[in-house]
Structure formats: C-alpha cells, structure tokens
Amino acid sequence: MRDFLGIAVRGLLHRKKRSWLTIIGILIGITAVVALVSLGTSMQLAVKRSFEELGYDVMMIVPGELGGGFGGPISFRTSFEIDVEALSDVEGVAEIGLMDYESVYVKAGTQEGFLDALGASENIFSFFKVEMKAGRVFSSGDRDAVVLGAEMAEELGLEVGDTLEIEGRRFTVIGIYSSDSRLDEDVIIMPLQAMHDLLGKKGVSMVFVRAAPGYDVGEVAERIEDFLYRTRGRLDLSVQTMEEVHEVVQQTLGILGAFLGGIAGISLLVGGIGVMNTMYTAVLERTREIGVMKAVGARDSQIMMIFLLESGLMGLTGGALGTGIGALLNVVTVFAAKKALGTQVLEYGISWWLVLGALGFSFLVGSLAGLLPARAAAKLDPVEALRYE
C-alpha cells in the first residue's frame, strides 16, 4: 500500500498545476458545505442557549391558535385580557409576568418619532434574567419611570436620570440593561399600568407563566388551557412551553441547514466532475506507463488502486483545505456578529464530527469520481498500451 501511495503522490506532483486546479474545485464545494452547516449549527446552539437561559419551566400564553407549532395565526401585537388573579390560582402556577407591545410617539432632546415600547409587570425582568448596565429596574411604586435597552439608550443619547416624553408625558430613565440580556435592546420598557394609562387601553400581548418547582410543565400547561377554555368559552389563546417552542425552532433551523448544505453540495458535485476529467486525462497521458507496469506483472486491481488513491488524495486535500477555510469563516461570522451587536449572538458551530465528516466525504467524492477512469486504466491491454504514443 505504501508503494501505491508513493506512485499516486508522484502522479499528482508530476502535473501540479492541473492537480491544484482540480483540488480547488473540491475546496470550494467543501468550504461552502462546512461554512453553511456550521452556520446552521451556530444558530441552533444560540437558540438552545437562549431557551436554557429563559428556562424550560416557563410557558407563554399568546393570541392565536398554534396547534403545537407555529402554523396558526399569531401576532404579539394583538392584545387580549386575562384574569391574572384567577390564573394564579391554577395548580402548579408559581409566577406570572405580563407584557404588552405598542408603538408610541417619543421625544428625546432633538429626536422624535415612533418607537417600540414594552409595557411590563415589574417581575418580567426575572423571566429574562436581565443584567443592568446602569441604574435599576422599576418597582411597584414607579409610574413615570422607564428602563432602556443599551442600544435604545445609545440611539437616543440618554443616560440614567435623563428624561424623555412618551405620548406627551414625561418619563425618567431609571435603568439601562446590558446587551447580554435576552430582551431586545432596541426597546423602551415601562410599567404596564403606566402604558395602559398613557394609551387608555387594557390587555396584554403576551403572558409568561413559571411552573412551581416539582410540577410537570406539560401538565401545568394543560391545566392552564382548561382554565382558559372555562373562563373564555373558546380557545383563542395558545399555551406554549419553552420546550415545545424550542423543538419547533430547532426543527426549522435543521431543515434550513440541510437545505443550504444541499445547495452547497452542488458545487461539490461540480468539483467531483473536475476530478473525473483530470483522471481520464491522466490515464491517457500515462498509457505507456500503465503498459510497462502490466508487462512487469502488475495486476488490474493494483493499477486501479493507484488511480483511486490518486483521485482520493485530490479530494482529501481539497477537503482538508476547504474544512479549514469553512471553519475560519464560521469563526469570523460569530466574531463579526458579536462586534456588530455587542453580544454573543451566535455560538461556534464547528465540531469534530463535522470536520471528520467533511474529510471523509471529500475523500469519498474524489475516489468515486476517479472510479471510472481507474477502471478504464485497469482494463487497458498491455500490448496496446506499450504501443501508445
């Protein structure tokens, strides 16, 4: 086998330019596959981390009928009313957080316009494990106070203690939460009652419910659904556990990653055709050499092995370089996302199975592409091969 490998390497080095052009074809395909698959993995890991930080003991009550997935109509801008006191009496419910999204008219210094605001109960910050960059979160006694995301504070040029007008009413910034929090940074958060008073409305856009320790989250979710049906007479609200939402999102990202990887695989197919073309040319160029090897006793299987190793090495070399470049692109993408958004949005998606899979697949593609040319070389008649000029 060592002798076969040496002959294959010498064959590649004999035609360096053509070999490298062929290797580049495999390299591009593997780079695309590794980069896209690792990006999909990065998104899946980031989503998993977000749900783990939020907690799998948390459920969401939202408008619309999700039916166990994201197939039904849903809008987090649609408000609904709910009996919070009665909901808190449902067995297994430990904590309830309320949230209402609205677009409000804001004036801050020389800047003014419509911005996203979030009316929230004071305990909503515990659901998202908010980390304060400056100041504090609001309490039950606060009415004219707001908390800003770091991005919103920077956009408006506000700090803790500054004031701004929302719908003509003056509010004071009492806190700014950091970019490491799971809440959207580009939003103004105010007490829920203050938003309702300001806009003359009732209702919420979303309700977060935390299950009590020791209770099965799925069973608590079923009890909440029964409660909603009894109190509303219809099931126009959906209860989703974080585990259910996580599974749906992961499945969606998995399908997307496989689709993108399949598209990238087309370029790998083109690279394989390039390997086949190069190997057919190599067989023609080395016809006399094949004849000599057969004349001195080389078997068809040995001739075939030499050419298969040659094509496989081209695939493996392109795969190794492509895997390295694809991994580098993933690192750059994660780093760029962190720099642009100021937080670890994505996780690194390179794993040992992806590296080994890419290397093995590239070697397999090269070997399969060289199978027909190797078979043609093995079937050459030694007498005719020696006569070939």
Image (cartoon, helix red, strand yellow):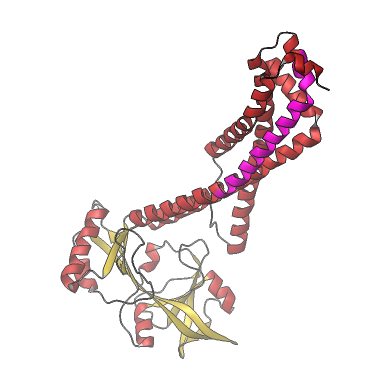
Tell me residue 256's x, y (percent): 49, 53
* Side of 144 relative to 157 (left or right): left
> Which region is colored magenta?
263-292
Viewer-nearest residue: 185 or 330: 330
Q: Quadrant of the N terminus?
A: top right
**Residue at 61% from the left image edge and 54% from the top image edge:** 333
Q: Is residue 378 magenta?
A: no
What count of labels does the image hold?
Answer: 0
Instruction: Examine the image and state in which quarter residue 317 appears.
Output: top right
Q: Is residue 283 at all visible to an observer of this figure? A: yes
| 21 in relation to 111, above or below | above
**Residue at 71% from the left image edge and 8% from the top image edge:** 297
| 71 in relation to 204, above or below | above
Tell me residue 54's x, y (percent): 39, 58
Tell me residue 86's x, y (percent): 19, 70
* Side of 99 relative to 371 (left or right): left
